[in-house]
Amino acid sequence: MNDEPAPDDSLPLLALVYGSLSMEQPLRHLIEASTGVCRPLWVLPFDRKGSRSALRLLKAQGELGGDVLDASKMSASEAAEALGERRPHGIVCLIDETIMWTAEVANRIDLPFHTLPTATQLTDKFEQRTALRAYGLPTPDFWKAEDVADEGVAADVMRKAGFPVVLKPRRGTSGRDSEPLRSEQALREAAAAVEPETMLIEAYIPDPTTAVVGPGSAPYASVELAVSDGVISVFGVTGRTPLAEPFRETGQIFPADVDPATRSALIDAASAATRALGITNGVLHVEIKITDDGPVVIEVNGRPGGLRLREIVKRATGVDLIQLEMRLALGERFAYTDVETRPGVDFMYLVQPNMNLRRITSVDGLDAVRAIPGVERVVPGIAQGSAFSWRTGTLSFAAEISGTAADHEAARRIRDQVLASVVVSGE
């Protein structure tokens, strides 16, 4: 017997493209965000056992809140036809991996979404860098990795960029397979080994020579914003703690520990990047590095920020960015001005294993972390005995710790205590 309550037919039907159990926001967050806003139609674009099993379990428990369309065996045209028969009022996706698929389907049945050129720029770092530069925004020099096998191009890289340069996937998130190349030999070996159209080589964006963020913060941040018919609303600037090698994130701090002038410059850069990519509707997470010459956009992400950022922003401002994305997809239009942030600092810290480890044997000290005042949640990451590689990026963390502090200094002290308490051992 299925005890799932009957859907509220007065609510609009929203196609919610759900691509990955491991990469998506927790299902409970998506269900919570949709409550009272829409009837979700869960659309599965990829053949993934875990995603299907999770949805099937929630449906059996009466918690899913909507029906499921398994489009994993369909072409884009077949998926569009099947979805069109359901007559959804809108379509939304919440991870980079599903943006192109969603754009292809949405454009076939005239559902509002990013255009195909914009979707390409949001998911291909080479195309995005090209669009930002064409708009007049500063970018690091960049090249298709396979082109660097040419002697002339390799010489151009070394002349313009020097070392290190950064090798990263053109399509990918969370620092996966991103690494510095520190010599001509490493550069040539990488260029010879890559598959065409898969990797990007770019100059390293220089660190500032003077302090532009508070102690314990890294010189980059993200701007959380929404666009509604071209009108940009900013919900805050999120700070970061220093990266773990090679490019793995270790924490988010909201609000960022920056002065008002730097905050304004970051927002201006994010807004310009939004216009450069022709984005007229959607919630964005724009990552930016602060340099001596001003902000340089690292990446425009065409969806709300990941990890705990949805919870952090919601708690600090009262705005649920995932729900906002759903409302935009359903045609609602709005403009926020002077978004108020509650006093204090919200944080999420990640303990990353040493990049040289290949297997995790133990993660100790989490009980001590739970006892630190201000810590509200401790989530174990990679399991004891698991294989480990830095190539999997940020999400292969050993532990995630989140909570609140009175101010940035208190948040820094908590992080120091966390790092002193947690010991990651491995082979």
Image (cartoon, rainbow, N blue to C red):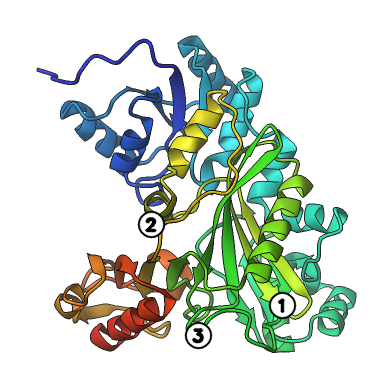
x, y percentage for residue 353? 35, 79
x, y percentage for residue 363? 22, 78
x, y percentage for residue 359? 30, 78
- Give the alpha-carbon distance from disc 3 to disc 2, as whole Å: 22 Å
- Callout 3 environment at 10 Å: few (<14), some (14 to 19), or many (20+)? few
Residue sitting at 35 percent across and 71 percent down? 406
Is label 1 in contact with label 3 (beta carbons under 8 Å)?
A: no
Q: Is residue 316 above or below residue 202?
A: above
Quadrant, the C terminus: bottom left
Name the mark nearer the viewer: 1 or 3. Answer: 3
Residue holding disc 2: 308
Residue holding disc 3: 215
Give the farthest residue toward the left. Answer: 1
- Give the alpha-carbon distance from disc 1 to disc 3, as whole Å: 16 Å
Question: What is the number of the mark on residue 37?
Answer: none
Residue holding disc 1: 291
- Give the alpha-carbon distance from disc 2 to disc 1, as whole Å: 27 Å
Residue sitting at 62 percent across and 25 percent down? 112
**Residue at disc 1, secondary structure:** strand
Is label 2 in contact with label 1 (beta carbons under 8 Å)?
A: no
Instruction: Give the quadrant of residue 162.
Output: bottom right
Which badge, 2 or 1, is on the more N-terminal residue? Answer: 1
Q: Amino acid at mark 3?
A: Pro
**Residue at disc 3, secondary structure:** loop
Q: Is residue 338 above or below residue 34?
A: below
- Callout 1 environment at 10 Å: few (<14), some (14 to 19), or many (20+)? some
Q: Amino acid at mark 1?
A: Thr
**Residue at disc 2, secondary structure:** loop
Q: Amino acid at mark 2?
A: Arg
